[in-house]
Image (cartoon, grey):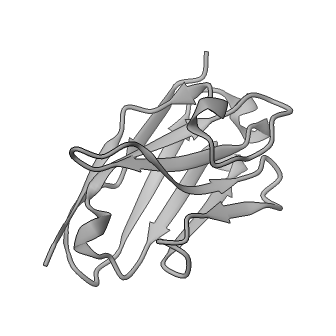
Amino acid sequence: QVQLVESGGGLVQAGGSLRLSCAASERTFSNYAMAWFRQAPGKEREFVAGISWSGGTTLYADSVKGRFTISRDNANNTRYLQINSLKPEDTAVYYCAATKEGYSVTRLPSAYFYWGQGTQVTVSS
């Protein structure tokens, strides 16, 4: 059972930056595609960014393209989401999620088997 732990959230002014981290409990995490999702109050969970197990494929929601960057550090069993030019509408709980070995990166939350507990990002105007 892979356990995922997010960190790096916080309160930031509009235009600021944050780097979210997702640490996994197992080395096999390096073989999994993973993604970041977010959920704002009263809204459904939405896809933000995803990265294949090899790092060769990345996906982004249109709303974050050019501002968010997903990356991986297999040596430290960690994935990152660099968030720049933050907007108030980016305020949400951000979750990392992982598939299993052999699964492709996708925007569908139902394709992910493991989820973290979430980290709050709040952007003030």
Of the pair 62 and 36, the residue shown nearer to us:
62
Q: Nearer the viewer, residue 28 or 59?
A: 59
The quarter of the rendered structure image containing the C terminus is: bottom left
What's the residue at 41%, 78% (across, down)?
A: 84
Query: Residue drawn at (54%, 57%), measured in percent from left and top?
Result: 80
Say if 107 sits above or below 97 in the image.
below
Is 22 situated left or right of 32 in this image? left
Q: Quadrant of the N terminus?
A: top right
Name the residue at 80% across, 42% down: 104
Pick the front one: 118 or 107? 107
**How many numbered dots are placed on residues in this image?**
0
Q: Position of residue 32 (x, y in %)?
A: 74, 37
**Quadrant of the image occupied by residue 8:** bottom left
The quadrant in which residue 95 appears is: top left
Name of the residue lying farthest toward the front: 43
Q: Is residue 106 left or right of residue 86?
A: right
Picture coordinates of residue 108, whole percent (x, y): 62, 41
Residue 20 located left or right of residue 49: left
Q: Is residue 125 left or right of residue 50?
A: left
Residue 29: x %, y % from top left: 69, 34
Question: Residue 14 appears at what percent x and percent y?
Answer: 22, 80
Residue at the top extreme of this rendering: 1
What residue is shown at x 50% (from left), y 61% (from top)?
A: 81
Q: Relative to residue 49, is residue 124 depicted above or below?
A: below
Above or below, comparing residue 2 to residue 121 in the picture: above
